[in-house]
Amino acid sequence: MTIGISTEANELLSLFRFKNEKEMKEILDNPKKREDVEDETADIFFFLLRFAQLYNIDLSGALERKMEKNNKKYSVEKFMGSNKKYSDLK
C-alpha cells in the first residue's frame, strides 16, 4: 500500500515538476490536464484510504493530532513572515 501511495504521489509530482506558478495555473486551467491532476489525486486518496482502513488508522484523529503538533512546533509568533527552516530558528 505504501508503495502505491508513493508511486501515485510521484505521478502527481511529475505533472508539476519544474513548473513555475504561472505554468501550474495553466495546467489547472486546462480541462484535460486538470483531469489528469484530479485522476492522480484520486489515486493517492484511494491508496491512503485503503491503507488507513487496513491498519485501523483514524485519519481524522491523526490529522487533528498532527495539526496540534505543528501548531506547537511552528508557532505563529516564531515563524510568521519567515521562510527559514525550522532547524535554523531554534
Image (tube, rainbow, N blue to C red):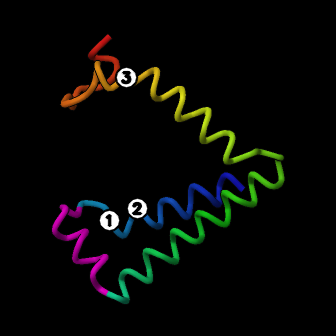
Q: Which residue lies under the disc numbered 1?
A: 16
CB under 8 Å between discs 3 and 1: no
Looking at the image, is 48 positioned above or below residue 78?
A: below
- Give the Cα separation between the discs numbered 2 and 3: 29 Å
CB under 8 Å between discs 1 and 2: yes
At horizontal 19% and vertical 31% (from top left) the residue drawn is: 81
- Give the Cα separation between the discs numbered 3 and 1: 30 Å
At horizontal 60% and vertical 70% (from top left) the residue drawn is: 43
Residue 36 lies, in percent from the top left, at 44, 80
- Give the Cα separation between the discs numbered 1 and 2: 5 Å
Q: Which residue lies under the disc numbered 3?
A: 75
Looking at the image, is 11 positioned above or below residue 2?
A: below
Residue 45 as seen in the image, left or right of residue 49: left
Q: Main secondary structure of the magenta part?
A: helix
What residue range appears in magenta?
Answer: 19-30
Disc nearer the start of the sequence (2/3): 2
Q: Label 2 is placed on what type of residue?
A: Leu
Question: Which image quarter is the N terminus in?
Answer: bottom right
- Outermost residue, front side: 77
Work out whether residue 2 or residue 21 is closer to the camera in this orientation and state it.
21
Graded by Cα atoms within 10 Å as few (under 14), some (14 to 19) or many (20 or more), the crowding at tag 1 reads: some
Q: Label 3 is placed on what type of residue?
A: Ser
Residue 64 as seen in the image, left or right of residue 86: right
Q: Which residue lies under the disc numbered 2?
A: 13
Residue 55 image label = none
Q: Label 1 is placed on what type of residue?
A: Phe
